[in-house]
Amino acid sequence: MPELSVVVHGPDTQDHLTGLLASLAAHPHPDTEVVVAAVGDWAREAAERHTPAVEVVPLPDGTDGAASRAAGAARATGRWLHFVRAEDGLPAGAPRTVAEHTAALPDQADVLLLDHVRSTWRTSGLPSPDGPLLARAGRAGRAPLALDEHAPLLRAAPLLGTRVVRAAFWRAHAQFLTSGRDEPFAARAALLLADRVATLPHPAYEHRPPRPESLPPVTAEQHYALVDRYEALLDLARGRPAPYAVLYDLMVRDCLRTFVRTAMPEPVAREFFRRASLAALRRRPEGYLRPPGPEGLRRSLLEEGAYTKYRAFQAANKARRAVRGTVRTRRRQAAALLRDHHYRRALTAPADPRLAVFSAYWNRGVACNPAAIAAKLGELAPWIRPVWVVNAADAALLPPGTDHVVPGTRRCAEVLASATYLVNNVNFPNSVVKRPDAVHLQTHHGTPLKRMGLDQLPYPAAARGLDFQALLERVDKWDFSVSANSHSTRMWRRAYPSRWVSLDHGYPRNDVYYTARAADIRAIRARLGIAPGRRAVLYAPTHRDYEAGWTPRLDLAALAGHLGEETVLLVRAHYFYGSAPSPLTGLRRTGRVIDVSPYEPVEDLCLAADALVTDYSSIMFDYANLDRPIVIHADDWEIYRETRGVYFDLLAEPPGPVARTQADLTEILTTDAWRDATATKARAAFRRRFCEYDDGRAAERVVRRVFLGQDEDALPPVPPLAERTPAPTPEEAA
């Protein structure tokens, strides 16, 4: 019996089935079977091209989704069933991820709720709004959840493809879930019927909603069915206060949205409003309180059945928004004109050769390569004054005495216009003019494994929101581009094609990995609360473009338990999630897991750690300078590679052992595999390739070349790797 049956079902009207089957065939998993309930001759022929790897259930044209699901499930032999619409998709490696997760679930779990990505005709791989919801539920641990205690899970998108169901559970309820029921009903009813619900807050399904204009017109009865569906779900939730309240709220919200956003003939709109009004009154939970403000008023009018009043309220709101929008636009335009006037006036004066503007990570503060360059500038060229561009919210965290300006202010505009040197590890705004007597220094903030710049074009999830023409205009302002290795130099040339000069001098932020002393390392570990003699493992995963929020891909409590009292986990989330609630809150006080996400600088964390565990983060390239063990946890490599794009196969050329599952990682860290001869050999090859220019003097070379105008030949040479001595390990420092 396979662990998982992927049941492909439903009609394929837009020819997505071929791509789905090709993707499944390209990434087979030994514990997964694929059953295709093929609707029509064309779908049958497409599926049969993949036999015997695929089990084909031929069905006549016109078979609907519910009937095809039932036929596919009847043929499936797996312990768990994953229903995938023929028009949807699966991210690469998703069946393997799901099968491994379900294999670890206890028998009480009936449904595994997945995160997903959305793809439309415009773009693909968009994070779903379910990400934060599943992340919050995931903080309760990996034990299956009782829906009555986690009723907000009902708010997850009603897609059956995001519910992997235990086969025995499905067969027990198949008649109820398929007879005359649509997919949104089955998706929510499955959660209500389940004894326990488990969550996998990582995308393992791709929803491809069709363009509405490609669908047949919606009939009046289909509009009314929305109300009927919710009434049936509320019947199912009767006697369960928390799920009932959530479903009631969803019903009122969805009915109002459908009424407002859907073009219905007037008689249909009136009848829909009437039915929704009756349901809102009849199903209203005891003690229900309407939300305050306009939303509460909308719900009140619905309960009254006040169709005419509601339409008048809509019209008044539309007019009010138009007036407010006009006022806001005029205010913004006036403020922008004033700032532009000050900026343009400052541009007419000669650039100040004693002024350098620094910024890092979209104005987050003093950090990364710009910080290391600014520090060295103070030593070698103290007559040049550094001014940092920092967001108002981050200004309070600046080192004492840091001269800074806040974006959008008059002084910021004047400083940007007057400075001779502009240093950033991302890009300055489009509005910054490249004046002839100014020097723009692009430092970057990592060695690229993932595709960057123009190389993101074929990857819509990564390219979402990017204006590539504007990007190239910003790149054209660069005079210099800092590189840590020849791999980076080649990739920057490819991703950011322009006339800039490459500074193959190493990353200034990595200098500390060669200059730190034993006392520095002892002091950092003391600040972090790491007791002498304990092994510190830094876990630093990266951002995923296809996820809406960050949830640890590891059960950190379980991992810490396996590693024992002598090991402490330092867990650092990607800076993109700095404002999100931490999923580590419950583990902070154990002393075995320390959330170091807000800690700066990250270089301190690397110096404090005996080993690094990461996935695809560029921190691995920096940490390799320390010549300490690195372990790669790559549970979703195929998904990451296909959605973000990569420059090389990390699994073929890793800096150390590779774990595909938590069990793999636990075994590596609880044996000598994390630092044995094989790991050392892999790390040595990785260091030769990616630690090419880092030697502790990168900042000096950059300052001498850019700010002091010295020739390349006059700069300190980079010694061979074998002649460089990294900072001592924590064990040596102790």
Image (cartoon, grey):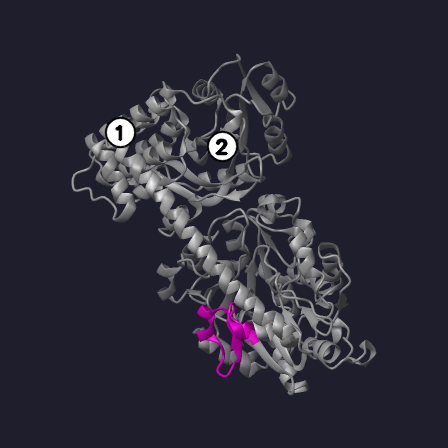
Where residue 365 sits in the image (x, y, percent)?
52, 71
List the single residue furthest toward the top. Answer: 60
Q: Which amino acid does label 2 sit on?
A: Leu
The answer to whether residue 360 is left or right of residue 79 is right
In the depicted structure, whether residue 410 falls above or below residue 98? below
The answer to whether residue 687 is left or right of residue 40 is right
Residue that label 1 marks:
236
Helix, strand or loop status at disc 1: helix
Q: Can residue 719 be seen at all in this image of the molecule?
A: yes
In the depicted structure, whether residue 257 falls above or below residue 702? above
In the depicted structure, whether residue 156 falls above or below residue 411? above
In the rendered image, residue 403 lying in the magenta stretch gets the answer: yes
Q: What residue type is labelled 1?
A: Leu
Residue span colored magenta: 388-412
Q: Which residue is located at x 44 percent, y 18 percent?
A: 67
The label on residue 4 is 2
List the single residue furthest toward the right. Answer: 713
